[in-house]
């Protein structure tokens, strides 16, 4: 049963010392527990007659946390449990288990994701009480409509809700709206503006970072983990947001004019570089945001005739994300090309 195997994998990744078995039609928790006479410990089962798999996993997380904190008692488990009540504490524990299952092969990346995305999303929840679909919907709708925060944090809350058996269709609908309608021409710096801004950056390693984001469309943290290849291609390492990829500059003339192969690199790690870079831009009065350099790179590729599919691969995101963000310009480019040579 794939769903049961996935649930047990999440429990194992979260280092919760219990598992779920299906005995007949009843889900059962299995763990090494104190004997009822208090004289020892052995592997024992706790049947959950009324529970479906989502409830069984929620109860398994509770049991695992009790065993980890050494506050397990049989009295608590002999009392019938309300099958569908999810508290804020339960929701946070489920988030921790889900996060552990996603990042158990890369703890460093997991720690970075927790501090930057998961923890801020969970802080939006009420401090206590019961979590329901309505509570989560109110939480998501308090985030600015159409913002990246609403999209990213809302999606994370929805993932946790799904792991607990809550309906998520309405939640996911509320997360939508970040994309082309929030990106305007004013956000996209012209090449001349980028060149002038780079000259205002005082420290050479931040000039290098700015130049790499402009010439290669990089996310700032990717500048901490890349390798130069032949013909000025670079390879972004696999411990980044979307894994390893190769990128070519656009325009290639900036490699020489920005001295990108001569300037020193920053020493910050991928988890700290972005903040340090933004702080440096603020100190030097540079108002161009790093992600707008990335948007400018995308439109430069389009202007050079690079297809949306290849542009998405160079930028390290899906074709769907690429098209939804840049659809306005993609459509305009198609219309212009279709009308070339047409007499009206």
Image (cartoon, rainbow, N blue to C red):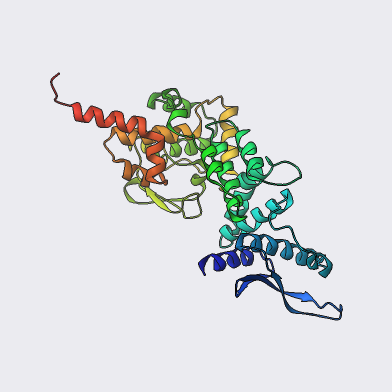
Where residue 256 sits, quadrant-wise, is top left
- The number of discs equals 0
Along the viewing direction, whichever of 116 and 89 lies nearer the viewer: 89
Q: Position of residue 172 (x, y in %)?
A: 53, 43
- Rendering coords of residue 325 (x, y %): 41, 35
Instruction: Please give left or right for residue 335 compared with residue 79 in the image.
Output: left
- The answer to whether 80 is drawn above or below residue 296 in the figure is below
Q: Nearer the viewer, residue 295 or 177?
A: 177
Closer to us: 182 or 33: 33
Q: Position of residue 154 (x, y in %)?
A: 58, 42
The reply to whether residue 47 is visible in this rendering is: yes
Question: The C terminus lies in which quarter of the figure?
Answer: top left
Name the residue located 66 percent from the left edge and 55 percent from the top edge.
94
Residue at image coords 68%, 64%: 60
Q: Quadrant of residue 50?
A: bottom right
Q: Determine whether, in the image, residue 161 is placed left or right of residue 263.
A: right
Compared with residue 148, is residue 64 higher up or lower down, i.e. above or below? below
Q: Is residue 191 above or below residue 90?
A: above
- The answer to whether residue 271 is seen in the rendering is no
69 left or right of 110 in image: right
């Amino acid at each position: 049963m794939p769903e049961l195997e996935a649930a047990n994998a999440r429990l194992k990744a979260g280092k919760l010392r219990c598992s779920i078995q299906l005995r007949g039609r009843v889900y059962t928790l299995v763990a090494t527990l104190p004997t009822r006479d208090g004289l020892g410990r052995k592997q024992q089962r706790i049947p959950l007659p009324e529970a479906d798999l989502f409830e069984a996993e929620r109860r398994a997380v509770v049991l695992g946390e009790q065993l980890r904190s050494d506050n397990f008692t049989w009295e608590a488990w002999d009392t019938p449990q309300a099958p569908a009540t999810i508290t804020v504490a339960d929701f946070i524990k489920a988030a921790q288990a889900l996060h552990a299952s996603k990042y158990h092969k890369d703890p460093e990346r997991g720690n970075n994701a927790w501090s930057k995305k998961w923890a801020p999303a969970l802080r939006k929840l009420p401090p206590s009480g019961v979590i329901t679909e309505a509570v989560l919907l109110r939480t998501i709708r308090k985030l600015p409509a159409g913002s990246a925060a609403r999209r990213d944090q809302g999606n994370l809350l929805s993932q946790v809700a799904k792991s607990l058996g809550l309906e998520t269709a309405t939640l996911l609908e509320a997360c939508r709206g970040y994309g082309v309608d929030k990106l305007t021409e004013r956000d996209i710096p012209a090449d001349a503006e980028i060149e002038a801004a780079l000259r205002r950056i005082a420290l050479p390693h931040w000039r290098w970072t700015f130049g790499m984001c402009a010439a290669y469309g990089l996310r700032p943290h990717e500048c901490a983990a890349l390798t130069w290849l032949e013909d000025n291609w670079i390879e972004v390492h696999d411990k980044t947001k979307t894994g390893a990829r190769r990128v070519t500059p656009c325009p290639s003339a900036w490699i020489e004019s920005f001295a990108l192969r001569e300037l020193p690199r920053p020493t910050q790690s991928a988890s700290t570089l972005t903040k340090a870079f933004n702080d440096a831009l603020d100190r030097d009065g540079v108002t161009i945001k790093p992600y707008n350099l990335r948007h400018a790179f995308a439109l430069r590729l389009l202007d050079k005739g690079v297809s949306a599919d290849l542009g998405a691969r160079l930028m390290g995101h899906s074709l769907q994300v690429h098209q939804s963000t840049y659809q306005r310009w993609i459509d305009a480019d198609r219309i212009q090309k279709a009308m070339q040579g047409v007499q009206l």
